[in-house]
Amino acid sequence: MKKIVFVCLGNICRSPMAEFVMKDLTDQYEIESRATSSWEHGNPIHKGTQKIFRTHGVPYDLRKTSLQISDQDFHTFDLILGMDESNVADLKQMAPAGTEHKIHLFAGESVPDPWYTGDFEETYRRVLAGCQEWINRLAE
Ligand code: 4NP
């Protein structure tokens, strides 16, 4: 089974949103999420993202806490999706040799970071659309 990891800066807002939205849409893939930074290490999913899950009926797991991507992760996952351009740039810097090809931008445009915008609904719309696009792309 193909393994996919969503990656953002803190792994508390956008990438866990993508993780649980994608898990709700498909059980065809192994799906996790990570941070590029260690800033939020061990912290739970942001309250704003949890509220989005409850509003839209997306099941989620409160045991999920922020985890920085490791060298091992670059080898383990088949597809490494950065939520914005700077996540992708950071991932390319961090990637062990031979794993760079796995890194892609999640959507055509960077997903806005609700940590700064406060707009979790806008982020949810972009995350949902992006997940649906990946499902279609991977099915081809
Ligand atoms: P995320 O949002 O990358 O979507 O999880 C952020 C979370 C925390 C911080 C920045 C962005 N922070 O500065 O701690």
Image: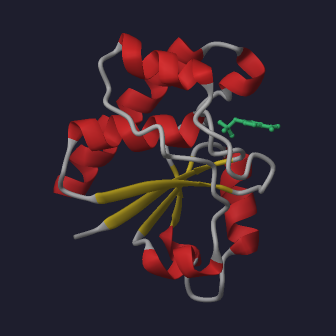
Asked whether residue 58 is in view, the answer is yes
Name the quadrant of the N terminus: bottom left
- Front residue of 79/19: it is 19
Q: Position of residue 131 (x, y in %)?
A: 35, 39
Name the outermost residue toward the front: 63
Q: Is residue 97 left or right of residue 81?
A: right
Q: Which quadrant of the render holds ligand 1?
A: top right
- Front residue of 127/52: it is 52
Asked whether residue 107 is in view, the answer is no
Q: Position of residue 140 (x, y in %)?
A: 17, 56
Image vertical order of residue 128 relative to residue 80, above or below: above
Image vertical order of residue 126 relative to residue 19, above or below: above
Image vertical order of residue 70 relative to residue 105, above or below: below
Q: Is residue 82 left or right of residue 9?
A: left
Q: How is the image coloured?
A: secondary structure
How many marks overall? Answer: 0
Q: Residue at x 39, y 60 (%)?
A: 4
Q: Position of residue 122 (x, y in %)?
A: 54, 15
Q: Residue at x 70, y 44 (%)?
A: 10
Q: Residue at x 28, y 68 (%)?
A: 2
Q: Position of residue 116 (x, y in %)?
A: 77, 23
Name the outermost residue toward the right: 39
Image vertical order of residue 80 relative to residue 14, above or below: below
Q: Residue at x 46, y 17 (%)?
A: 52
Residue 67 falls in image quadrant: bottom right
